[in-house]
Amino acid sequence: MKVLLVLIISFILTTVISRLFVDDWNIMLNGNVAMMLMLWFTSLGHFMFTKGMVMMMPSFIPFKGALVYLTGIMEIVLGALLVVNAARHIAGIILLVMFVVMLPANINAAIKHVDFEKGTYDGSGTGYLWFRIPLQLLFIAWILYFSVGI
C-alpha cells in the first residue's frame, strides 16, 4: 500500500539525511516527520476522492462529505503539529483517537467492496482487511512510540 511506502521511505530518507548532515540519527524527530508526510499524503485522498471516502462510511453517519473534508484538514494540521515539540504529545493523542475511530470506516468499506479512488463498489473486499488492520495497528504503535512517548 502506498501509505506504508510513504511512511517507511520517508523515515529511512530523513534518518539518513539527518545522520549525514547533522551527525545525529534524530530517530524521534524523523519518526514524526515520516508520519507527518504520510498524513499529508493520505489527506490528499480526502480532497481528490471525496465521493469514495463518503462511500466508506456507515449509513448512520450524518454530514459525510463535510466529515471527509474535516478529517483531511485534521490530518494536515495534526501532521504538522507532530514536528512541534510543544504540540507533539497532544497531536499524537488526537491522532490515536482518529486512527481508532477511522478503523470501522475501513472495515465497512472492505465489507461493501468500496474502491475509494474510483468511487465504486468493485474494491478488493474483506481480504483487504488482512493488510489494513495490521497497518492501522502499525500507525497506532508508531504514534505511541514516536509522538506520545509510550
Image (cartoon, rainbow, N blue to C red):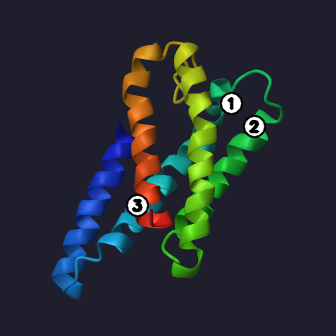
For disc 2, the marked residue is 65
Q: Real-space Cα distance between discs 2 and 1?
A: 6 Å
Q: Residue 47, how many percent across, how many down? A: 62, 45
Q: Earlier in the sequence, mark 2 or mark 1?
A: 1
- Verify CB contact (< 8 Å) between mark 2 and mark 1: yes
Crowding near the residue tagged with mark 2, few <14, some 14–19, many ≥20 C-alpha atoms within 10 Å:
some
Looking at the rendered structure, the secondary structure element under dot 1 is: helix
Seen at 55% across and 29% down, the residue is 106
| Residue 113 seen by the camera | no
Q: What residue type is labelled 2?
A: Gly
Q: What residue type is labelled 1?
A: Val
For disc 3, the marked residue is 145
Q: Which of 26 and 67 is in front in this view?
A: 26
Q: Nearer the viewer, residue 124 or 102?
A: 102
| Residue 79 seen by the camera | yes
Q: Residue 52, how many percent across, how many down? A: 61, 28
Which of labels 3 and 2 is toward the front? 3
Q: Which amino acid does label 3 sit on?
A: Tyr
Does residue 101 appear left or right of residue 126 in this picture?
A: right
Crowding near the residue tagged with mark 1, few <14, some 14–19, many ≥20 C-alpha atoms within 10 Å:
many
Seen at 69% across and 41% down, the residue is 68
Q: Real-space Cα distance between discs 1 and 3?
A: 31 Å
Looking at the rendered structure, the secondary structure element under dot 2 is: helix
Q: In which quarter of the image is the C terminus?
A: bottom left
Which of labels 1 and 3 is toward the front? 3
Q: Is the residue 111 above or below the residue 4 in the image?
A: above
For disc 1, the marked residue is 54
Q: Is the residue 33 above or below the residue 60 in the image?
A: below
Residue 114 sits in which quadrant?
Answer: top right
